[in-house]
Image (spheres, rainbow, N blue to C red):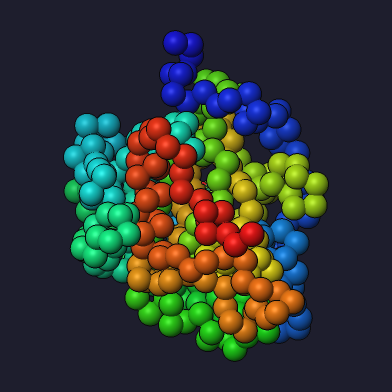
């Protein structure tokens, strides 16, 4: 064993280059308060990048700060304290410090909660098992304000999520509310992330390269930075510059499939830093568990036939969650398994 445990070591081709602090131009910054051309700006950003940042997003800064502050307090507790609300295979909400992405351990600790209680999911990913589970959030005793901060935060975030969803629908030439019914019941989740300083940032990643599998992700990252996105134009990793009071938005694989690949979900990862720790909070806006995800009829035709077979969102996410939780011998489930060639 070297400075960091073997479980964290990325294969050579996944190790981060040293270009951490060079922020490339490109990731669009969109002002949500503008009335002119907003829909086409969103459409272009989704098409060309799959990622964009938004300002004037409507989420009050103090609500976010309250959650960030309570998250810092929580992660500052001794490990035994945090492990009292430890997540497990069945209870997927709570604290977790051994998350894996593609079978390599991530240099981070997390606290997961659902935006809508109860969180309803299939009991297993086996296709014929119809049993469901209903989960509720588990809050730590300390800090006591974490629960309230989280509950207030998700109320604000939901407004932003629906606004973005409408803009995306319009940009695809659909009615603004085209996606709403999928989100009437949701499996929306939030993750508080803490990426501690890492003695070997050239060998490990805070979060390995992946695509988000759900609907939309709306991410807060603090000023430490570290998020990188794989550019669609040249395949290079581009760092997303932290800009105060903005959110980073990316389309997940569910939108990729609904849009029949008009919008693609893009790979991203998090680099760690030997000097600075980092906090981030992704909000994963996800449809109801029973949603059958498939290309929308309006967006397909004879020239552009559906590129995917329908799949069940709940089964998909339940399967994927298991790989995040532990190292498995099998590869993670991928939407490419539903691709029609
Ligand atoms: O921490 C971040 O900046 C990114 C988080 C992320 O990509 C994820 O949790 O899916
Ligand atoms: Fe992600």
Q: Residue 289 in the image: x percent, y percent?
A: 35, 67
Q: Residue at x 62, y 31 (%)?
A: 14
- On the image, which quarter does residue 151 sit in? bottom left
- Residue at the image position 62 percent from the left and 71 percent from the top: 306
Q: Tell me if I can see residue 58 in this picture.
A: no
The quarter of the image holding the N terminus is top left
Q: Is residue 200 left or right of residue 139?
A: right
Image point (72%, 65%), residue name: 47
Give the farthest residue toward the bottom: 175
Q: Nearer the viewer, residue 40 or 150?
A: 40
- Left or right of 273: which side holds 292? left
Q: Nearer the viewer, residue 210 or 115?
A: 210
Let me know if residue 159 appears in the view: yes
Q: Position of residue 114 (x, y in %)?
A: 32, 61
Residue 110 appears in which quarter of the rendering? top left
| In the depicted structure, whether residue 272 falls above or below residue 130 | above
Residue 195 picture location, percent across and down: 47, 37
Instruction: Pick the residue in front: 336 or 122.
Output: 336
Q: In this rendering, would 14 be left or right of 87?
A: right
* Figure check: 96 above or below 274: below
Q: Residue furthest top?
A: 1
* Residue 11 x, y percent position in the rendering: 58, 25
Q: Residue at x 55, y 21 (%)?
A: 200
Q: Give the answer, above or below, for where 86 lies relative to 9.
A: below
Q: Is 335 in front, or is 40?
A: 335
Q: Quadrant of the C terminus?
A: bottom right
Using the rendered view, name the quadrant where residue 129 is placed. bottom left
Tag count in the figure?
A: 0
Is 78 on the left or on the right of 307, as rendered?
left
């Amino acid at each position: 064993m070297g400075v960091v445990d073997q479980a964290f070591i990325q294969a050579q081709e996944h190790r981060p280059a040293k270009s951490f602090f060079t922020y490339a131009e490109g990731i669009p910054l969109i002002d949500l308060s503008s009335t002119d051309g907003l829909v086409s700006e969103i459409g272009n950003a989704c098409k060309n990048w799959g990622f964009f940042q938004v300002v004037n997003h409507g989420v009050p800064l103090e609500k976010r700060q309250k959650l960030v502050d309570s998250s810092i307090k929580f992660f500052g507790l001794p490990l035994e304290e945090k492990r009292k609300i430890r997540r497990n295979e069945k209870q997927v909400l709570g604290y977790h410090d051994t998350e894996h992405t593609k079978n390599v351990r991530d240099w981070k600790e997390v606290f997961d909660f659902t935006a809508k209680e109860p969180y309803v999911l299939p009991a297993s990913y086996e296709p014929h098992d119809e049993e469901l589970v209903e989960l509720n959030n588990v809050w730590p005793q300390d800090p006591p304000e974490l629960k309230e901060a989280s509950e207030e935060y998700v109320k604000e975030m939901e407004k932003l999520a629906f606004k973005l969803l409408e803009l995306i629908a319009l940009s695809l030439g659909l009615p603004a509310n085209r996606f709403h019914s999928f989100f009437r019941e949701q499996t929306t989740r939030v993750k508080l992330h803490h990426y501690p300083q890492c003695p070997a940032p050239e060998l490990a990643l805070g979060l390995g390269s992946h695509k988000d599998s759900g609907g939309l992700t709306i991410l807060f990252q603090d000023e430490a930075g570290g998020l990188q996105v794989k550019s669609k134009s040249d395949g290079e990793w581009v760092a997303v510059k932290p800009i105060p009071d903005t959110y980073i938005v990316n389309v997940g694989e569910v939108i990729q499939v609904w849009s029949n690949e008009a919008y693609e979900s893009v790979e991203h990862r998090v680099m760690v830093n030997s000097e600075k720790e980092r906090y981030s909070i992704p909000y994963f806006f996800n449809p109801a568990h029973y949603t059958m995800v498939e290309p929308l009829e309006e967006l397909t035709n004879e020239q552009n036939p559906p590129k995917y077979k329908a799949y069940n969102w709940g089964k998909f996410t339940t399967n994927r969650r298991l790989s995040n939780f532990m190292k498995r011998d099998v590869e993670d489930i991928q939407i490419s398994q539903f691709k029609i060639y």
